[in-house]
Amino acid sequence: MTSSSLLVPPPSSRWPVDPREIRPGIVLHLDPETLLAQGAIYSCDDDRRVIGCHFFLCIEVTGECGRWLPLYSRDGFGRVRLSQLGRSGHSKWVTSECHFHEDQVWRATHQAVVAAARVGHDFSEPGRRNRIAVESLPDV
């Protein structure tokens, strides 16, 4: 290890999410196990919840807590395709096909989301976070 490598933080913490950035429309790559360990809850049956790191879309913020939809790259039973209108950020996010399930909504504190983004290796940057315009958010 060189002395210059000590100055560069590991990728998982290079651009940590600031809780003040969390607002409807932000999309972060989160680890659901970390969310759960930090007290998050979800609305679906245990055997239907998201497993492994996924993109999550913030659909509502109340105080220091948000409602989040896990996003899937494939269609599936009961899943709804997310509009591509109003997307900004990384080209993979802007052009990818994403789906969500209306019956799976997560509620988590901003601090839980910050921790889950770190563990989930969210590589977005301040000022260039993946987003979807508020007017394009699904009504869930």
Image: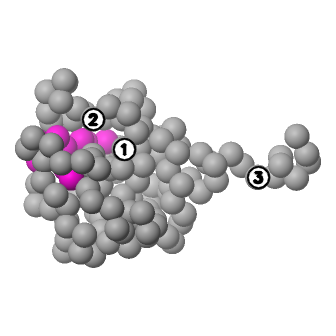
The earlier-in-sequence mark between 3 and 2 is 3
Give the foreground label among 3 and 2. 2
- Residue 3, label in figure: none
Is 22 placed above or below 85 here?
above
Q: CA distance from mark 3 to mark 2?
A: 32 Å
Q: Tell me which segment is drawn in magenta.
A: 99-108
Density class for disc 2 (Cα within 10 Å; few <14, some 14-19, many ≥20) is some
Give the foreground label among 3 and 1. 1
Q: Which residue is mark 3?
A: 8
Horizontal and vertical percent for residue 125? 54, 63
Q: Which residue is mark 1?
A: 54
Residue 90 is at least partly visible in this image:
yes
In which quadrant will I find the C terminus?
Answer: bottom left
The earlier-in-sequence mark between 3 and 1 is 3
Is 137 placed above or below 50 here?
below
Residue at position x 38%, y 73% from top? 88
Tag 1 and tag 2, C-beta contact below 8 Å: yes
Residue at position x 15%, y 61% from top? 138
- Residue 50, label in figure: 2
Horizontal and vertical percent for residue 38? 40, 32
Front in this rendered view, residue 104 or 109: 104
